[in-house]
Amino acid sequence: MRKSALMMFTMVLISTSLPVAAQSLEELARIVREAATTEASINQEREARFVRERDNQRQLLGEARQELANENARSDRLRVEYDQNERTLADLETTLAERMGNLGELFGVVRQASGDVQAALDDSMVTAQLPDRTQFLSELAQRRELPTVPELRALWSAMVTEIAESGRVVKFTAPVERTSGQKEELEVVRLGVFNAVSDGIFLDWDTSKSRKNFIELARQPAARFSGMANDLQEASAGEIVPMSVDFTRGQILRAVVQSKTPIERVREDGGPVGYVIIGVGLFGLLMCLWKAIALFSTGGKITRQMKKEEPDKRNPLGRVLAVYADNPEADIETLELKLDESILRETAPIETGLSFIKVLYVVAPLLGLLGTVVGMIATFQMITLFGTGDPRMMAGGISTALVTTVLGLVVAIPLTLIHSFLQGKAKSLIQVLEEQAAGIIARIAEQRA
């Protein structure tokens, strides 16, 4: 029974591993023998592959060990060679230091001079005409070896060329940056290393950027200088024309750009007090103009009346003369009183407005003083908040104080002069009336004597 059970288990095992189930014991034995043969062949193949891989790994391990030994030997050889090179280099440096002697000092001077000359040439506007002339100077300033004779001659030539170009007036084409930010190729006239002009405008050599170029000044000098710039650019070779030169190499021109015009100073620094002073000045000028027209018109009427015998009541003198014509029989004292009364009536219209103009030219400097006080208060506030370390923090208040003071004086001085002139004109007209009245009294006294 156990034998039959074993046979059933074997048949089930073989049936699960083989594609075809055995039909008899002989067939089962045959299948088992074939499976054992196949399994033995597979095992032999696996063992052979394992042996090959083991032999290959042993070979690789041997090669790696040999390579490691070679590299260790090479490392030892390089270490010995490095030590020998270090000793040789130290000996050579000692020999070089001994042989250089005074040449070492010359080497330092050349490097320093090259750096200084490079900085000077980079900042010079001649570089716009002769670009890339400082490249060898940069290399020479960083050189660790002694310079050669041609390099020393090139350094000397660069210095002499800069000196020669500083005294020449040259025309050339260069990029110019306009105030709008656009760059244009324009004809530029260079006056040494001091000024550059193009199309009647002054240019500034901008050294603040890595790429240095000419820029158009946002604000140009006076018109006469622009005219000189035009004449210079249109002048032919060898022609001598007058031209202004900024010997500070652009500092004065930059100050012109940064400086404020009088209108900008009044608008930015005058403040409310400045506007009030300007308003007072304009109103005073209008009053003076109105009063001048009135006085000269009255003077013309009085002059025409003096040429007539018949009194015209449309002018002050005619109205004074009409008093005598209306009272021919009055006694001298009465007539004199009536004439004085008439002159007093005519004096008031003639002098109308003069007292107000006087008030204006008195108030103007007082307003300027008010602006001065306001500006000083602002200055002291800045000092309280930020101290006196930066004078620019106090410049606004001081500028307000000075600008308002100037505005007050500018308004008061002309108004004072104009008021004096108008008052003299009014007094002369009143004097004419008094003279004519006195003449009338004198004629009547002669007639009745």
Image (cartoon, rainbow, N blue to C red):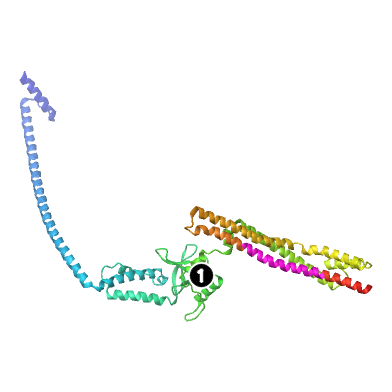
Asked where in the image residue 288 lies, by quadrant, the reply is: bottom right
Query: Up-down: is 29 above or below 392?
Result: above
Q: Nearer the viewer, residue 236 or 359?
A: 359
- Location of the N terminus (image quadrant): top left
Residue pictured at 11% horizontal, 48% vertical = 60
Q: Nearer the viewer, residue 434 or 307?
A: 434
Q: Residue furthest bottom?
A: 238
Q: Which residue in the structure is indicated by mark 1?
A: 201
Q: Give the magenta-colored segment's residue range.
A: 407-432
Residue pictured at 80% horizontal, 62% vertical = 348
Is residue 21 visible from the viewing direction of this image?
no
Q: Is residue 412 magenta?
A: yes
Q: Nearer the viewer, residue 350 or 385?
A: 385
Picture coordinates of residue 357, whole percent (x, y): 71, 62
Residue pictured at 74% horizontal, 62% vertical = 355
- Residue 444 lies left or right of residue 432; in this view the side is right
Picture coordinates of residue 121, whole percent (x, y): 38, 70
Q: Residue furthest top?
A: 1
Query: Up-down: is 152 above or below 39?
Result: below
Q: Nearer the viewer, residue 295 or 7?
A: 295
Mark 1 residue crowding within 10 angstroms, few (<14) / some (14–19) / many (20+): some
Q: Give SS at disc 1.
A: strand
Q: Is residue 204 magenta?
A: no
Picture coordinates of residue 420, whole percent (x, y): 72, 67
Picture coordinates of residue 29, whole percent (x, y): 5, 28
Instruction: Say what amino acid the circle numbered 1 marks.
Output: Ile
Is residue 425 visible from the viewing direction of this image?
yes
- Location of the C terminus (image quadrant): bottom right
Query: Up-down: is 239 above or below 113?
Result: below
Majority secondary structure of magenta residues: helix
